[in-house]
Image: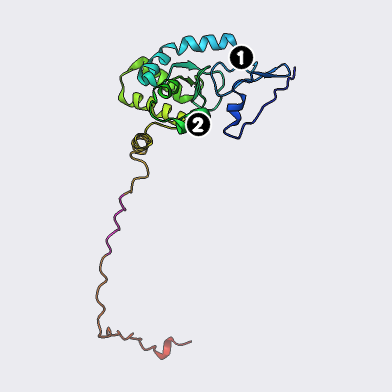
Amino acid sequence: MKWVMRFLLLIDPMDEVSLTNLNSYKDKSFVDISKEDLDLGDKNEEREKEMKQEYSQTCDWIKKRLGERVARVDVSNRLSSSPCVLVAAKFGWSANMERLMRAQSIGDTSSLDFMRSRKVFEINPEHEIIKRLNAACRINPDDPEALKAIDILFETSMISSGFTPDNPTDLSGKIYDMMSTAMAGKWASQPQPAQPSQQPAAPSSSEPEPLEAEVVEPVEAGQQK
């Protein structure tokens, strides 16, 4: 059975503001795909329930690490190739709305900080990075490298989801450290092999070597045919 889904591509920063109070048009409901609880009609509830049980401990572990930076950590049903994504809560600000509000904020920013914390960090249980973090959570949840990986995943997902990292310099340092660890021992300069020593050639004498004359025995007359 084929079904058609129509999309609105909002490219102007003020488009979202215009649609904030407009929930539907001609019996068509608007759904913001940048927010939580996205349902495109292709949910596998049994599979989703199984994954949530499998990664429940990992989600709690990641939430503990991220603290107040996110409202919740969930297993995603929208990802295929990415390890994670950062989405706005149902009544939170999207990345575009957050940029607009930050540009207009003057003085008291408490409401801004509150709305910024209303984000949901979704992880992809099918991705290799998340599978490895799940194993790290069960084996050694205090592993500093695993905790650093959580920080990098979260902050890179902020960039890919349109949000602005709180400290880009700190993020760059973490990425460089992880790259150095991953590249350790690779492409290192190899020692040049030792060249075989060559024996010096014997000096040639300037004097010509004496030639030995070949002595030919005389042939007697009786032996000639």
Q: Secondary structure at mark 1?
A: loop
Q: Residue at x 53, y 18 (%)?
A: 36
Q: Residue at x 26, y 78 (%)?
A: 204
The x, y position of residue 176, in whole percent, is 36, 38
Q: Amino acid at mark 1?
A: Lys
The x, y position of residue 13, in whole percent, is 57, 33
Q: Nearer the viewer, residue 167 or 115?
A: 115
Q: Which residues are magenta?
A: 191-198
Q: Amino acid at mark 2?
A: Leu
Question: Badge 2, how many Cα within 10 Å: few under 14, some, many 20+?
Answer: some
From the image, give the main secondary structure of the stretch colored magenta: loop
Say if 210 sits above or below 189 in the image: below
Say if 41 sits above or below 196 in the image: above
Question: Badge 1, how many Cα within 10 Å: few under 14, some, many 20+?
Answer: few
Q: Is residue 134 magenta?
A: no
The x, y position of residue 152, in whole percent, is 39, 29
Q: Nearer the viewer, residue 123 or 23?
A: 23
Q: Secondary structure at mark 2?
A: helix
Q: Residue at x 46, y 11 (%)?
A: 54
Q: Which residue is mark 1?
A: 43
Residue 124 can be seen, yes or no: no
Quadrant assignment, res 203: bottom left
Q: Nearer the viewer, residue 24 or 224?
A: 24
Q: Which residue is mark 2?
A: 100
Disc 1 or disc 2, which is closer to the eye? 2
